[in-house]
Every structure is written in structure tokens, then in C-alpha cells.
Image (cartoon, rainbow, N blue to C red):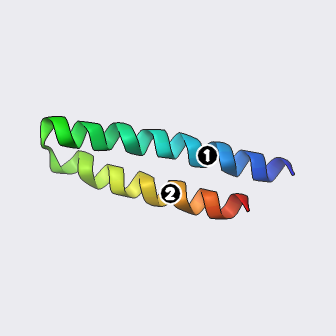
Amino acid sequence: MREGRAWRGLAVTYGVVSAVQAYLAAVMGVVWAAVLAAVFLAAAIACGFAAR
């Protein structure tokens, strides 16, 4: 039960980081922020699946 909550917490954290990176990519127009947004989104999805 504890592991599921930890994975869920990581998924939320990575999701928030992904949203911030996507915002930076949109506002600043930098490629590195878009790449990081995609990486953190993939990590959030993977953690979400691990939480199940």
C-alpha cells in the first residue's frame, strides 16, 4: 500500500514539473524546456502505471 502512494506522489510531482517546463517552453520558446517537459511527462505516466 505504501509503495502505491509513493509512486502516485512521484507521478504528481513529475506532472507538475512537466507543466512548468511546458509553460517555459511556450513563453520563452526554448527547445530544452520542451524536451524536459516531454521527459517529465513520460516519467509521470510511468509512475502512474507503477502506482496501479
Percent across and percent down for residue 47 are: 61, 57
Q: Is 4 left, or right, of 39 in this rendering?
A: right
Residue 23: % across, % down: 28, 38
Figure quadrant of residue 30 = top left
| Whole-number angstrom distance, CA of label 2 to CA of label 1 | 9 Å
Q: Quadrant of the C terminus?
A: bottom right
Kind of residue at disc 2: Ala
Pointer 2 or 1: first along the chain: 1
Compared across the picture, whether 5 is left or right of 41 comes to: right
Residue at the farthest left position:
29
Q: Which residue is depicted at the point 77% across and 53% down?
A: 4
Mark 2 lies on a secondary structure that is helix
Percent coordinates x, y for residue 29 in the rendering? 12, 42
Q: Give the left or right position of residue 16, taking residue 52 as reference.
A: left
Residue behind mark 2: 43
At label 2, counting other C-alpha atoms closer than 10 Å, the crowd grade (few under 14, some 14-19, many 20 or more) is some
| Residue type of the residue flagged with mark 1 | Leu
- Apparent side of residue 1 relative to residue 7 in the rendered image (left or right): right
Q: Residue furthest right?
A: 1
Q: Secondary structure at mark 1?
A: helix
Q: Please tell me the numbered disc located at residue 22.
A: none
Instruction: Tell me which residue sits at (43%, 52%) in the image.
Output: 40
Depicted 5 relative to depicted 51: above or below: above
* Whether label 2 touches label 1, CB < 8 Å: yes
Reading the image, the residue beneath label 1 is 10
Front-most of residues 2 and 48: 48
Neighbor class of circle 1 (other Cα within 10 Å; few <14, some 14-19, many 20+) is some
- Rendered location of residue 26, percent (x, y): 19, 41
